[in-house]
Image: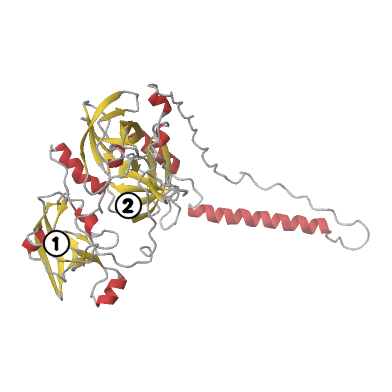
């Protein structure tokens, strides 16, 4: 149950028993961020739709259409020669005629106009002031060597992305029971979001959306499409590592989202969220930016969610399980948590982590995570200096300790790493062509693979660089 002082919480639903992302338990390296880690509460209480409990859904009004902004107006100099200037007459009284002040001012004005016209003609001859060729959908011609700003129509991008992904965003209505402090049970209902990732009824959402307060999978799910059609849903499986789950409905020919890539997200790029905030406002679209990547939060029961995307796109209770999109409408994350009492601090699970789960579901396989059987410490510049290492990135394979202080071997006996020949003190600097660094930590990169796949670990052993093929195992359920 969420307490008022919990700074972090999932957007809705109940706490799920979610161990850290990745295949192993790393030894924490001291970093300035790690020095203060607020305790998180996994979801506030699920937001209850009063109209849903009574069996009806409030009709939603369509948002007003937004007219495109006016095109900028081009300015051009007026055509024609400058107006004639009539000089002031010289005095008629004796002696030679002298120019008056009016004549001097008129002459100055005429010179300025002629000079300006000449300057404009010179600039115009370069072509810099020529209008661009081509419309919004065509290419623009410009003078070679000219550095002209590139305009991005953010409004149009958000509109297009929402139109592309919106039909595949669903609302998930959950019904179950909760155990009271006296040992009894009471009805429990909640609302979350999800995305259709395959047109044959496959839906990706959050684990805490489809589980009750005890962590058990809810027995009754109703999936509502954007057009109002409702289907009974069943939970195909939940992830043992992250706050993700897969739901199935019996339907075909459904609209499906386009899955993007989260590995190369850049801080500052546009992010778009769609979901059902408060369980009432279906298909609400908000936009912002990617605020940071690689974030970790601790939920109320002590579990941690790692390698999250931070965004300031507005997300609220009911958005859980909905998509975080990029500017072309592809899914880059699944919205999962928001900081209580914050303004613009939300978190999403990178879509690359969900990739193996979706592939396993479509193949009819049980959901599982890869495992290599090592314990390690992420290398930072501080760790490099402390241990005198030759690199400032990678994963240092080393012994660890458990919560009671008991020693744990760096290489799990009989595990995939032991079979491949890894040793304590090795540094894993890459998997395949992907380097292991602060933006691509070992557990995140491993999470994009499935058990049974063979990966090439690039190892630094002393001054020697090795490549060791490792056949990934299946992560035990108790890790």
In which image quadrant can residue 43 be found?
top left
Quadrant location of the N terminus in the rendered image: top left
Cα distance in 3D space between marks 2 and 1 = 24 Å
The foreground one among 163 and 213 is: 213
Drawn side of residue 40 relative to residue 249, left or right: right
Residue 223 rendering spot, x and y as whole percentages = 29, 29
Q: Report the number of discs.
A: 2
Coloring scheme used: secondary structure
In which image quadrant can residue 417 be found?
bottom left
Drawn side of residue 371 relative to residue 87, left or right: left
Disc 2 crowd rating (10 Å Cα; few below 14, some 14-19, many 20+) is: many
Residue 201 rendering spot, x and y as whole percentages = 22, 30
Height in image: 47 above or below 31? above
In which image quadrant can residue 469 be found?
bottom left
User: What residue sits 45% from the left and 53% below the top?
Assistant: 148
Choose the circle earlier in sequence order: 2 or 1: 2
Label 1 belongs to which residue? 457
Disc 1 crowd rating (10 Å Cα; few below 14, some 14-19, many 20+) is: many
The foreground one among 142 and 257 is: 257
Circle 2 sits in a helix, a strand or a loop, which is it? strand
User: What residue sits 79% from the left and 53% below the top?
Assistant: 87
Label 2 belongs to which residue? 308
Circle 1 sits in a helix, a strand or a loop, which is it? strand
Residue 338 rendering spot, x and y as whole percentages = 40, 47
User: Can residue 265 be seen here?
Assistant: no
Residue 28 rendering spot, x and y as whole percentages = 28, 64
Q: Residue furthest bottom?
A: 388
């Amino acid at each position: 149950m969420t307490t008022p002082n919990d700074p972090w919480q999932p957007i809705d639903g109940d706490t799920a028993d979610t161990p850290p992302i990745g295949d192993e338990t790393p030894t924490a390296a001291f970093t300035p961020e790690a020095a203060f880690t607020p305790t998180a509460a996994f979801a506030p209480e699920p937001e209850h739709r009063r109209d849903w409990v009574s069996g009806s859904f409030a009709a939603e009004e369509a948002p007003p259409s937004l007219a495109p902004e006016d095109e900028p107006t081009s300015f051009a100099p007026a055509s024609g020669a400058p107006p004639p200037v009539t000089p002031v007459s010289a005095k008629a009284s004796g002696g030679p005629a002298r120019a008056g002040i009016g004549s001097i001012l008129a002459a100055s004005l005429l010179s300025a106009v002629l000079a300006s016209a000449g300057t404009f003609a010179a600039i115009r001859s370069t072509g810099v002031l020529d209008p661009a060729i081509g419309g919004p959908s065509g290419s623009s011609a410009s003078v070679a060597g000219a550095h002209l700003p590139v305009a991005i129509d953010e409004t149009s991008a958000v509109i297009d992305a929402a139109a592309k992904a919106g039909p595949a965003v669903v609302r998930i209505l959950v019904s179950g029971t909760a155990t009271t402090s006296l040992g009894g049970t009471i009805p429990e209902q909640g609302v979350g979001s999800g995305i259709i990732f395959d047109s044959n009824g496959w839906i990706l959402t959050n684990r805490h959306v489809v589980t009750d307060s005890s962590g058990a999978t809810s027995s009754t799910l109703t999936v509502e499409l954007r057009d109002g059609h409702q289907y009974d849903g069943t939970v195909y499986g939940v992830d043992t590592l992250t706050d993700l789950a897969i739901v199935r409905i019996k339907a075909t020919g459904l609209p499906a989202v386009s899955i993007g890539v989260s590995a190369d997200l850049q801080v500052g790029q546009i992010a778009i969220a769609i979901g059902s905030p408060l369980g009432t406002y279906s298909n609400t679209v908000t936009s912002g930016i990617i605020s940071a990547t690689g974030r970790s939060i601790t939920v109320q029961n002590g579990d941690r969610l790692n390698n999250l995307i931070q965004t300031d796109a507005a997300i609220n209770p009911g958005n859980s399980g909905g998509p975080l999109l990029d500017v072309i409408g592809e899914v880059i994350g699944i919205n999962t948590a928001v900081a209580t009492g914050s303004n613009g601090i939300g978190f999403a699970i990178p879509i690359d982590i969900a990739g193996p789960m979706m592939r396993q579901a479509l193949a009819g396989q049980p959901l599982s995570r890869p495992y290599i059987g090592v314990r390690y410490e992420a290398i930072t510049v501080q760790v490099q200096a402390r241990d005198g290492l030759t690199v400032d990135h990678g994963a240092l394979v080393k012994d660890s300790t458990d919560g009671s202080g008991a020693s744990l071997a760096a290489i799990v006996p009989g595990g995939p790493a032991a079979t491949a020949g890894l040793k304590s003190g090795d540094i894993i600097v890459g998997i395949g062509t992907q380097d292991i660094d602060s933006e691509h930590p070992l557990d995140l990169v491993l999470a994009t693979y499935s058990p049974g796949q063979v990966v090439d670990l690039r190892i630094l052993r002393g001054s020697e660089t090795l490549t060791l093929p490792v056949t990934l195992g299946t992560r035990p359920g108790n890790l």
